[in-house]
Image (cartoon, rainbow, N blue to C red):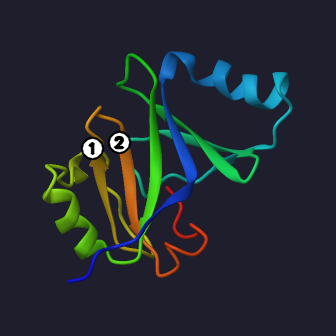
Amino acid sequence: MGKPEFSAGLNIAMKIPKAHYEATVAFYRDTLGFEVAEEEVAYAPTVSRTHAVRFGPTTLWLDCVDNYSRPDLWLQLHTDDLDAATSTLADVGIRPCDEVEPLADLDTRTHWIRNPAGVVHLLAESPKAGADGSGAAA
C-alpha cells in the first residue's frame, strides 16, 4: 500500500441548529446576494433540510440539524486511495467516525474523520485527488 495523496474538496458544510436555520439561509441569499438553492437531503438522515450556496469555487452547504444547540463547520478532503489514507491516518491516531452522519447511496467511497481539534471532515476517494481536488459532494 503506497502513500496516499490528499487534496482539499470543494464543499464545506455548516451544521446549523433549527432555531437559526431560516435566518442563516436568508443572510446568504437576501443580505449577501449569493445564489442559494434548496437541495434533496435523503442521503443524510441527520440533516432535515439543506441549501447549497455558491461560495466562489466552493459550495457551502447550509444543513439544518434539528438536535444541534450550536453551529458546527465540516470540511471535505479527497484522496486517491481511501484504504491507504485510512491506514496512514490511523498511524497518527485519526480513525473513521462514520457514526457522526451515516451516508447512503453515494457514488464514491467515503469515511468521516475528525482532525485533532475535533473538526469533522468527509474523506472521499477520488482518482484525481492530487490533480484538481474535484470529486464527490459532501
Q: Residue furthest front?
A: 3
Q: Residues within 10 Å of mark 1 (few under 14, many from 20)?
A: few
Q: Examine the rendered structure and indicate whether residue 53 appears above or below residue 135.
A: above
Q: In the image, residue 23 lies at what x, y percent?
A: 66, 18
Q: In the image, residue 121 lies at what x, y percent?
A: 38, 48
Residue 14: in sight, yes or no?
yes
> Residue at left 68%, top 29%?
25
Which badge, 2 or 1, comes first in the chain's sequence?
1
Q: Examine the rendered structure and indicate whether residue 112 appears above or below residue 61.
A: below
Q: Examine the rendered structure and indicate whether residue 16 appears above or below residue 13.
A: above
Give the side of residue 103 with respect to residue 78, left or right: left
Specify the quadrant that holds the N terminus. Answer: bottom left
Q: Secondary structure at mark 1?
A: helix
Give how far apart the Cα atoms at labels 2 and 1 are. 9 Å
Q: Examine the rendered structure and indicate whether residue 89 appears above or below residue 59.
A: below
Q: Residues within 10 Å of mark 2 (few under 14, many from 20)?
A: some
According to the image, label 2 marks what residue?
120
> Residue at left 40%, top 77%?
80
> Residue at left 58%, top 24%?
21
Mark 1: amino acid: Val
Q: Secondary structure at mark 2?
A: strand
Mark 2: amino acid: Val
Q: Are marks 2 and 1 in contact (CB under 8 Å)?
A: yes
According to the image, label 1 marks what residue?
100
